Image (cartoon, helix red, strand yellow):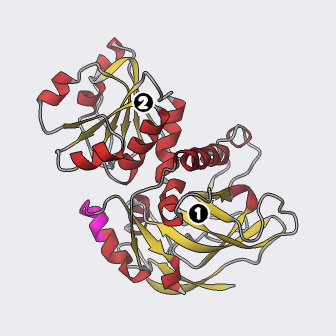
Amino acid sequence: MRVNAYAAPAAGQPLAPTTIERREVGPNDVLIAIEYAGICHSDIHTVNGDWGPQPFPVVPGHEIVGTVTEVGADVTTHRVGDRVGVGCMVNSCGQCPPCRGGDEQFCVNGTVFTYASEDRDGTNTQGGYSTHVVVDADFVLSVPENLDAAAAAPLLCAGITTYNPLRCWGAGPGKKVAVVGLGGLGHMAVKIAHAMGAEVTVLSQSLKKQEDGLRLGADHYYATSDPDTFSELAGRFDLIINTVSADIDVNAYLGLLTLDGAMVSVGAAPGPLAVNGFLLGARRILTGSMIGGIALTQEMLDFCGEHNIGADVEIISADQVNEAYERVLASDVRYRFVIDASTLA
């Protein structure tokens, strides 16, 4: 079926209206009428060619919420009329150890991502800046009905990207968690860590978003441009979630960890990080994390439904996408742009 979409025709080129072909609904497929699609910084990196050559034209978008309009003959998990979501991946081999362990995002044979990826049938996947999408039912998630659909869309990337390390490293009562950066990822990390019961501190370059940070659930807020911050907070945190996609002084932040504390980077910094050997002196952990598997993503959505957590969003029409990209790069959004897919009809 032909559907309306917004696509990047080539690297660094503005997105423009187009039509794309969606496959026919197979036995285990779900056809989704998209309602909202979030704009992730990864979309911008991809269409700008920051992450290497891409199979242009590319329709970005991996934060998708919509309604099921058709299901394949073998689908038992979703029904017509269900509110559902699609995140960053739409297929995997299902047989390798990571897939069998629920970590499809690390599929040894190649995770199929929601856009700019080669699907199992050899075609290139196209994302959520479109009116409809057809997805294997095993990669379609249930979105709690109590959540606002637009606010729920960013949970499919920003939500799971921050929930995964918070859960894996045991954020909860008695734990002190720092969130570096208060943007699309950071504001979700604050909300989720607070709901988990952790003591939450925001570490931001300045105090200009302090009021927002405290409103979102932070207990403390510090400016990293103040050198006294790093001496005052030395050795304080059990877990640091680094959400920024720029180079930072990793060694300064590692000094804020407790014995056996962990710093987890979820932002995609452009270059290598220089780490001093003093990491050995306190059993500090420096690691990275990305999205979670399908089961964990569903757990995250259920958790957010239980705690009524959605993203803070600015809803835009499809013809505002290029302006929105510019504003994301200028850090001029609080805190996630979401496209109203009805404007593509």
- Location of residue 128 in the rendering, given as x and y in whole percent from the top left corner: 55, 70
- Location of residue 130 in the rendering, given as x and y in whole percent from the top left corner: 55, 77
- Location of residue 204 in the rendering, given as x and y in whole percent from the top left corner: 23, 42
- Location of residue 14 in the rendering, given as x and y in whole percent from the top left corner: 36, 79
Image position of 317 with respect to 310: above or below = below
Please report contact status of discs 1 and 2: CB closer than 8 Å, yes or no. Answer: no
Please tell me whether residue 327 belongs to the stretch shown in magenta.
yes
Q: Which quarter of the picture shows residue 321?
A: bottom left
Kindly identify the residue that appears in the image at 46 percent across and 43 percent down.
Answer: 162
Mark nearer the N terminus (1 vs 2): 1
Question: Within 10 angstroms of label 1, few (less than 14), some, or many (20 or more) residues?
Answer: many
Q: Which residue is mark 2?
A: 198
- Name the amino acid, label 1: Thr
Kindly identify the residue that appears in the image at 28 percent across and 24 percent down.
Answer: 256
Say which of marks 1 and 2 sits in front: 2
- Name the amino acid, label 2: Ala
Q: Which residue is mark 1?
A: 114
Relative to residue 205, is residue 67 drawn left or right? right
* Magenta part of the chain: 326-332
Relative to residue 277, is residue 239 drawn left or right? right
Relative to residue 177, is residue 5 drawn left or right? right
Q: Which quarter of the picture shows residue 206?
A: top left
Can residue 323 be seen in this snapshot?
Answer: yes
Tell me the quadrant of the picture where the C terminus can be found.
bottom right
Gap in Å between the C-alphas at discs 1 and 2?
32 Å
